Amino acid sequence: MIPANFDYITVKSLDEALSLLAKHKDDAKILAGGHSLLPAMKLRLMQPKVLIDIGKIKELSYIKEEGGQIHIGAMTTHFQIETSALLQKSCPLLPETATQLGDMQVRNKGTIGGSVAHADPAADWPAAVIAVGAEIVVIGPKGERAIKADDFFVDMLTTSLQPGDLVKEVRFAAPKGKTGQAYMKVRHPASGFAVVGIAVTLTVDGGKCSASGIGVTGVSSKPYRAKSVEAALKGSALDAKSLAAAASHASDGISDAISELYATGEYRKHLAEIYTRRALETAAGRAK
Amino acid sequence: MKKISVTVNGTTHQSEIEPRLLLVHYLRDVLGLTGTHVGCETSLCGACTVMVDGQAVKSCTVLAAQADGSTVTTIEGLAAGGTLHPVQQAFWEHHGLQCGYCTPGMIMATAQILQRNPDPSEEEIRHGIEGNLCRCTGYQHIVQAVQCAAKKMKSQPAPANR
Ligand SMILES: Cc1cc2nc3c(=O)[nH]c(=O)nc-3n(C[C@H](O)[C@H](O)[C@H](O)COP(=O)(O)OP(=O)(O)OC[C@H]3O[C@@H](n4cnc5c(N)ncnc54)[C@H](O)[C@@H]3O)c2cc1C
Ligand code: FES
Ligand code: FES
């Protein structure tokens, strides 16, 4: 399995990458970790004429907290997120998501920027970035802009990125107050991708849920925010009955659940409810 | 064609390659290092695992061009001066293989696991080798080999960078 021929260009800066993207337009693809792109090229599902390798752009690999905002550079690997002391302390949902993604070798190479840009409907990051209310910071021919994660994912393998755009970073407000988080997933036994993945972040005030973020991946052709679950949780107690009631709304309004040999749409919706309940219980137990 | 310079097991090679050449084929077909195996070609089995700049990667999912300027360690580079690396020794002693097809990748993955966590639990070991498939052993002896390697490495640390 060998990809079709292409020209390969390594860039050292964002500016260089942007001008090459502008020059080669649709002929070019960004190469980040290559762990979605190269498999697709080996199967000849994709045959870009030019690969622009951004792997050596140092300025795109960072995890930092500034003024209450957490910033994660596009080229930050899953492994770096998994082992980040900053994130383990201030947003453990992300390391917990990372550790369940793929396998050790995939986590060493794959990046969060590549994952969101690729928008695989079974990818893990989309659920987590929706749950924490992240923005995807994009840089393109007209400068920089921030797109809410909720609006970034448009459809299967489709985002609101425009030609010439690059994902620069993922950023979000560091969780404040008494919070509990959890990522729970049903792994596809062969691929490791999410059959269903539920990311939860809960804020607790006086024994009640004051705010929550619930991201769901795997169920539908695009990841989504479980708004009815969030609405049911608002002001609710955190006992098993209330959490189960809220979780029962996990697939409300989803009419295009993915059906394939391994899992039918109905089964995925069922799993979404069960795993939302479990993730809520775990997150509530961790809220401190 | 693209010119690359890659240091493999301590030797620097200058090569001219097609950009689409995969690292595993560069190692096997250009450099003749056939210890790194090709199992699935689809990023799933881990038989092709090597270290690039100290990180275990599946070399069927990395372009040789991406490794330009990097340091690569393959299974051939693990034993220092004819003495088996403690992980190799442990796989031998615990019979952590049957046909041996998965073994080079298993051993490279194990080296990474123990580099990062010298004292892994059984669960951490199984999580660490999730990207390496073995069709023969049922993994039990592999896990035992990793546990033994951890003990060995505590008493005789492996040389730096290996
Ligand atoms: C065996 C295996 C198992 C996996 N299991 C999982 C799993 O369980 N869960 C999961 O979520 N994922 C999984 N993945 C996918 C993995 O997480 C990929 O690393 C990730 O989806 C893509 O990141 P990348 O850096 O490798 O991107 P690449 O493959 O380099 O790029 C992917 C796409 O995004 C574009 N792109 C990349 N970076 C940018 C950028 N900064 N700006 C704009 N466009 C960009 C590329 O042009 C390309 O179209 C798995 C992959 C493999 C090989
Ligand atoms: S040959 Fe590379 S993962 Fe199987
Ligand atoms: S020993 Fe045969 S595949 Fe592992």
Image (cartoon, helix red, strand yellow):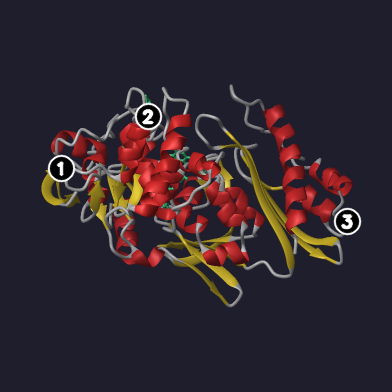
Closest to the camera, between mark 1 and mark 2, is: 2
Label 1: state its secondary structure: strand
Query: Mark 2 packing: few (<14 Cα in 10 Å), some, or many (20+)?
Result: some
Looking at the rendered structure, which numbered label has been put on residue B17?
Answer: 1
Q: Which residue lies furthest to the bottom in this view?
A: A67
User: As shown in the figure, which amino acid type bears the numbered disc 3?
Assistant: Ala
Q: Is residue B96 above or below residue A287?
A: above
Q: Is residue B146 above or below residue A151?
A: above
Q: Nearer the viewer, residue B139 or A160?
A: B139
Report in which chain the residue with disc 1 lies: B
Q: Residue at x 50, y 58 (%)?
A: A83
* In the image: residue A134, left or right of residue B1: right
Quarter of the picture containing the N terminus of chain B is top left
Q: In this view of the protein, can residue B55 be seen by the observer?
A: yes
Closest to the camera, between mark 2 and mark 3, is: 2
Q: CB under 8 Å between callouts 3 and 1?
A: no
The mark tally for this picture is 3
Residue that label 2 marks: B95
Q: Is residue A20 above or below residue A26?
A: below
Q: Which residue is drawn at 37% across and 50% down?
A: B153
Label 3: state its secondary structure: loop
Looking at the rendered structure, which numbered label has been put on residue B123?
Answer: none
